Amino acid sequence: MDRFFKLKEHGTNVRTEIMAGITTFMTMAYILAVNPNILSAFKSGATGLDWTSVFLATALAAGVVTICMGLFVNFPVALAPGMGLNAYFATVILTSNGAITAPIALTAVFVSGIIFVILTVTKVRQMLLVAVPDSLKHAITVGIGLFITIIGVKNSEILTVSLDTTTDIKAGFTPLPSYASVFGLGSMHNPNVQIALIGLILIAIFMVIRLKGAILFGILATTVIAYFMGYVDLGVLTAKETTWVPDFSKLNFAHFDFVGMLNAGIITVILTFTFVELFDTFGTLVGTANRAGIMKNREEGNKRVGKAMFVDALGVSGGALVGTSTVTAYVESSAGIAEGGRTGLTAVTTGVLFLLALFLAPIAALIPGSATAAALIIVGLLMMQSVKEIDFQDMVVAIPAFLTIVMMPFTYNIANGISFGIVSYVILATLGNLFGKNGRNVHWLMWVLAILVVLRFALIGGE
């Protein structure tokens, strides 16, 4: 192990690496409960995806891709279906009125993964990262955080959305006339609201006392309390749908519909998956590489980050192949790095634990949707922290960043936020240059992206 992972060279040992891997797993294991709930529309099956199949896909994709990251890149970063993109995935299906099915959406993710491979191999991916200003990158992260939060408060029924005083919208935000939209606070007598608030309080307390795996332990503790409240059915532990031995026949392997994807015309969806993942992964990989000291040798560090990007790109298509949304590098990996993880042995340890979790489906199925909704709200908070990196005193970057942030949750669409941010930045930065005040150099690729956005709205509208 020392020779393969170069442990001594990185100033670490087997025990430290394994403990770091366990720590990383504990901080991100919540995805095993949250992702199946989101992609199966909180166990209702409204998206056309089965809860068990998504659970198997989540654990399998996270385990295999993370192990590959450790073995082939020697990088202490774990991967799993990404928060935000999984919510966007479900929203696209639920708000398409049947035009986009689960196989079509999975095909879109698969294609975006192929695009990533091409962009990575041709170095275009790195070029795009230079073209888009840091302010928009941070704004995208913040906007997705708010997008996740609004899903959490809506699915827990803390937030109510109605056509009138009697009709609630459950599946998603339906386009309404401005005078007809009614947003309100849910009833405190609603068990779903009570469970979500309990979960929110517990996770917050655990985070304040710096308990490792605060989100996971918060979800588990909330589930225990929900059981004593009478809202958890232990029958799921013996149900045929959630067996202790993985039933891979339920896996949606290669559940694709290429013809349907072409007929549905979801180019915008594919580009959104590609665009958001592009910045999310880069920020996570570079940030964790810096924390692990990998970037001290700039040339070697860049080479390893490049290899990590390639594994990440393959993971996107690989995740879609087994039936889950976009797989991406997790910022929670920094928890393991903080524990001393410096090599791929940390990632391999985390990956093995995800594969072992395949045998824990019944326990994950016990967790009520409101408990995972509380986790969504907290994850939104963590993503909001990037807002401090945006200079709101400089209007050239402040206005595009603001539009990026608010358009995501308020229009219930990640792509809309990115679109408004890109176009407004190109316009304002160019005008600033013309008038000699607060100007910015606008990369030619930003002009290409802005033109594509305008064509998107002009040709296919804002849906």
Image (spheres, rainbow, N blue to C red):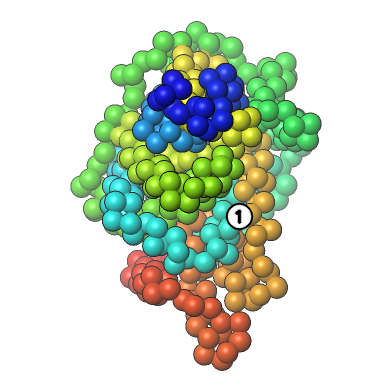
* Tag 1 residue: 142
Q: Residue furthest top?
A: 238
Report if residue 149 is visible in the image: no
The image position of residue 390, as x and y in percent, is 64, 63
> What amino acid type is highlighted by mark number 1?
Val
Residue 388 versus residue 122: which sits nearer the camera? Answer: 122
Q: In which quadrant is the N terminus drawn?
A: top left
Examine the rendered structure and indicate whether residue 54 appears above or below residue 362: below
Q: How crowded is mark 1: few (under 14 residues within 10 Å), some or many (20 or more)?
A: many
Label 1: which secondary element = helix
At x 43% / y 33%, what residue is drawn?
Answer: 74
In the displayed structure, does residue 305 sit left or right of residue 340?
left
Residue 72, picture quadrant: top left
The image position of residue 325, as x and y in percent, is 41, 39
Q: Residue furthest bottom?
A: 435
Q: In which quadrant is the C terminus drawn?
A: bottom left
At x 49% / y 22%, what residue is drawn?
Answer: 349
